[in-house]
Image (tube, rainbow, N blue to C red):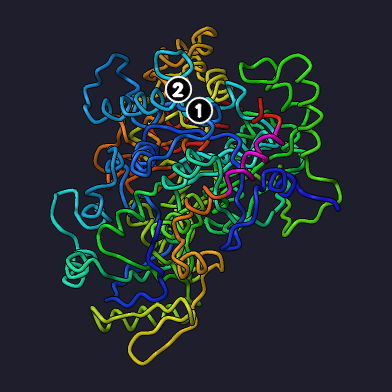
Amino acid sequence: MAKTLFQKVWEAHTVRQLPNGQTQLFIGTHLIHEVTSPQAFGMLRDLGLKVKYPHRTFATVDHIVPTNELKEPYSDPIAQEMIEALRKNTKDYGIRFFDTSTGMQGIVHMVGPEQGITQPGTTIACGDSHTATHGAFGAIAFGIGTTQVRDVLATQTLSLSPLKVRRIEVNGKLRPGVYAKDVILHIIRDLGVNGGIGFAYEYAGSTFDNFSLEERMTVCNMSIEGGARCGYVNPDEKTFEYIKGRPHAPKAADWDAAVVRWKSFASDPDCKYDDIKVYRAEDIRPTVTWGITPGQAIFIDEKMPALELLNAADRATAEDAYKHMKLSPSTPIKGTKVDVAFLGSCTNGRISDLREVAKYLKGHKVSPTVKAIVVPGSQLTAIQAVKEGLDKVFIDAGFEWRGAGCSMCLAMNPDKLVGDQLCASSSNRNFKGRQGSQTGRTVLMSPLMVAAAAITGQVSDAREIFKV
Amino acid sequence: MSLAKITQVKAPALAVPGDDIDTDRIIPARFLRCVTFEGLGEHAFRDERTGPDGQDRPHPLNSEQAAQIAKDKKGVMVVGFNFGCGSSREHAPQSLWRFGFTALVGGSFAEIFFGNSTALGVPCVTLSKDDLAELNLFVQKNPGTEVAIDLEKMNVSAGDKTWKASIPASARESLISGKWDPIADLLEGSSAIEKTAQSLAYVAK
């Protein structure tokens, strides 16, 4: 019978059926970080349990790392305590830790792919909802809670129910100045922030075929913003090429066998989906959010929606959003004053994002009224960027160049909005208070749109500013 | 490990209306800077409850009924649709549970939030849109009224009204059989786990 990648991976990792009817699913790769793991290690100790397969858990530190302070002890004692707890836990249990001193630390969803740990046909869990990022490689990857982190540490398995699969096809060529970020914002705008509940999203079509792995990661990353716990792209030659030669990639004779195995996990051409949606790439324009959920989005040249045009269910959230954002229905978002520009995060903090922006940024200056920061998602990205001279381009333009980490995506570190500052952000969430100030405002957009906002001091169309 | 069989929750209800309430709102990220879950209860919905000036804002969790729930550690939160969306942080259900909420009734729940809650023994049941609106109205008109969630009969009742409720079968089974923390069952599968590990080339070596 023809099957989807989701079904094949699920079957290969099924241990047994549990009494409650759920599947005991084997988690081949477990990623941990400092925020959602300490309590799990605490539970493990309380129960007197060991880590079953220490070599299948990998750790890094990202959320609390100050990106403007490279020496320890950090000025924030809680951050220091959290990083030390992870050092102790990984040492006690024999878990590989990509610590800040290794040159390989970074946002957990960047470290996995960079190290070749993220592979097709595998199951990947992490106490972080953006784990779907790894689905770009044809893995079934999803976020879990801390009790489940304990379950994976102790048994390398989870109690789960299978998901339905929705194929989301995007076909054709994106117009200039339109990026993977616009694609996923467009999809979420269309399907809603809860449209994906109960589904895994399979992203497909010629647009995805032509995307680099980094672009695929940007899309998969935000699956959860559409309610889908997991999103993936079928593995292809580009996937294999990305993995080849990385530290944890299969070597020598194992490589060929791995590629054969990986290919076998791709969805069969005649498999059945629970739902299919199809989009045309040329219909998508640069997209920005105007509200407090990632689904409250419009094309940059559209007006924000009139309340009476929204369906009743969306109206209350929209009213709340307009109030919080201090924006008005039926007016353009273009021209809205911006105070902060943030370029980074597990959505858009990769080398291709930095390269694309740097290509256009030369000769431009950040507006004197804007604080602009660029935060490479990982140390390896930062090193590569410096090698290419990208740091200099950003610094010359007036951006602050930072160390690797989550930074202002979620403000668990010193990078925070102040008061009702409005941030043009390449991150993934525009929730109230997300960026560290309860009255702070976030407008999500692609990296190049962030650069345009930084230069003009307002929400702008990057295609006009940079003559894209 | 022996856990309580959760077949019924009967407790004073508190309505926290609104759809798409995300986990950043339930527990702002700054409270995740910790290595235990202790003390999270008092910070549930912190930024909705307290203004930037440090003053209390009008919010259901600042009400007398909420104070009673916090005191008795017994309460049912009545919420909207897509409750708990966003981050996977277990800190969110932990903060509600530690505040005193022992069950939630809503229109729909984000999946990770739902799983995290179930593993704490906090049932999250759903009602149809119209029934939820009716329950909400009833709770708002009768502050502190008791709501009963019956997981065996799969209904929710308040006053003299009863509505049909839903919950995924596996979660219901886990709760009513007292196996909502899955660790015991997972550990039992040890030999089957090893067999699966051996069958996966990237794991075995």
Q: Is residue B201 above or below residue A25?
A: above
Q: Amino acid at mark 1?
A: Phe
* Percent of width and height locating residue A62: 40, 28
In the picture, the quarter occupied by the C terminus of chain A is: top right
- Left or right, A232 with respect to B90, comes to right
Taking depth in this image into account, of A175 and A117 the one nearest to the observer is A117
Q: Is residue A99 above or below residue A327?
A: above
State which region is magenta: B189-200
Residue at mark 1 shares a chain with residue at mark 2: yes
Q: Find disc 1 in the rendering and name its residue.
A: A58
Residue A182, labelled with which disc? none
Is A243 colored magenta in this rendering? no
Tell me the chain of label 1: A
Dividing the picture into quadrants, the one containing residue B5 is bottom left
Q: Find disc 2 in the rendering and name its residue.
A: A97
* Percent of width and height locating residue B110: 48, 58
Taking depth in this image into account, of A257 and B3 the one nearest to the observer is B3
Q: Amino acid at mark 2?
A: Phe
Categorize mark 1 by other alpha carbons within 10 Å: few (<14), some (14-19), many (20+): many
Q: Are marks 1 and 2 in contact (CB under 8 Å)?
A: yes
State which tag comes first along the sequence, 1 or 2: 1
